[in-house]
Image (tube, rainbow, N blue to C red):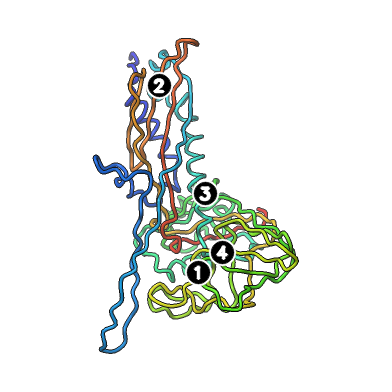
Amino acid sequence: MANTILTPTMVTRKALEILHANLNFIGSINRQYDDSYAKSGAKIGSTLKVRLPNQFEIRTGATLQAKDVEESSVDLVMSTQKGVDVNFSSVELTLSLDDFSERILEPAMAVLAANIEADAINMYKDVWNMVNTAGTAQPSTLADWLAARRLLNECLAPKDGNRYFCINSLAMAAIVDALKGLFNPQSAIADQFRDGVMGRAIGFTWLENDLIVRHLTGSRDNTTPLADDATAQDGSTIHCDGFDQNATIKKGDVITFGGVYAVHPETKQSYPYLQQFVVTKDATATGSTGDVDLEISPPVISTGAKKNVSAKIADNATITVIGDASSYYAQNLGYHRDAFAFVTADLEMPKGVDFAAREVFDGISMRVVRQYDINNDKFPCRIDVLYGYKAVRPQLAVRIQGKKNE
């Protein structure tokens, strides 16, 4: 049967289908905010303010204690444009769609998908919850993963079927081997054997992704850093000392402060473990006393409806930076879908070109444009996606740290 000429729409739809199939992390997170950028006649520009759930204080007794509602939001910025550029001829457009996909689209989309996915997975740096903090062994027992589940439960992550583990092949191999046949239905055991993945277990869908980042911790000696302020500190900037001179604390490092415990988000009762914080900006200690201001998230809030810790950070509270200095640890992720958001927007369609189309599939917008290069008798083509991403509710996520330097 004679091949038909492939149209711009056919090429774009197929390219987008292949791209989507390669985005398993992005496919598991919230993409509902796309429409806010796409409203005709009411476009919001490049920044969307995502409202966070309101929090309130409880009253005991009959006396009214009305307080103003303090609404919170985070900015989700549409700022990244990535694409892949190829040359293909009009002759190649006479191939069957399957042949064209195999020769041109699949390798091009694999590269584009990997780079978009890698960007999004870097949102791990906004997540402060962490388990397997020692990092001395690969997380492989059910207890390792149930610890992550517990943290999500205690942070009130919904139990609605939208929880995921996104982990690298090393962690997947360890957990599949450790749990093969354990309390699993026969069909699930067959899938584990056939595909080497967990599928769905303990309330999570398990995804294997080898773009999981190995976080490099900051450099420091065996010192005992301390919070340093005559007045107990709160907020998102904490002054510290006791680091060695020129020690570095990296964005994405997780720390705790002695005496500062996590609390239940609603009752505000203390949990029996220290609140974890993530460093949000690279910092370097200076001077002989190793002074440094650490920018952290979440901010320390010890009173009111948004209270998230048992107490302010006292002067000389011991600081623990999780993990050894200058070491790599894989940052496997457990999360509810709403912890992260990924958005795309429609790029403008150019006029006067040889070939152009734009398609949207499952919340991802892609544009393909081809032009004729008369000087070289070629048809350069560009495939573009404009996107943004944000950890909008990072408390609904947890990092399951891999073994040191693996």
Q: Which mark is residue 105?
A: none
Could you tell which of marks 1 and 3 lies nearer the N-terminus? 3
Cα separation, mark 1 vs mark 2, equals: 51 Å
Cα separation, mark 2 vs mark 4, equals: 51 Å
Q: Residues within 10 Å of mark 1 (few under 14, many from 20)?
A: some
Type of amino acid at the residue the image marks with label 3:
Gly
Q: Quadrant of residue 204?
A: bottom left
Could you tell which of marks 4 and 1 lies nearer the N-terminus? 4
Tell me if I can see residue 185 in this picture. Answer: no
Disc 3 target residue: 196
Type of amino acid at the residue the image marks with label 4:
Thr
Disc 1 target residue: 235
Q: What residue do we see at 42% from left, 45% from top? A: 388
Which structural element holds mark 3?
A: loop
| Location of residue 148 with respect to 165 vertically, above or below | below
Which structural element holds mark 2?
A: strand
Disc 2 target residue: 370
Disc 4 target residue: 141
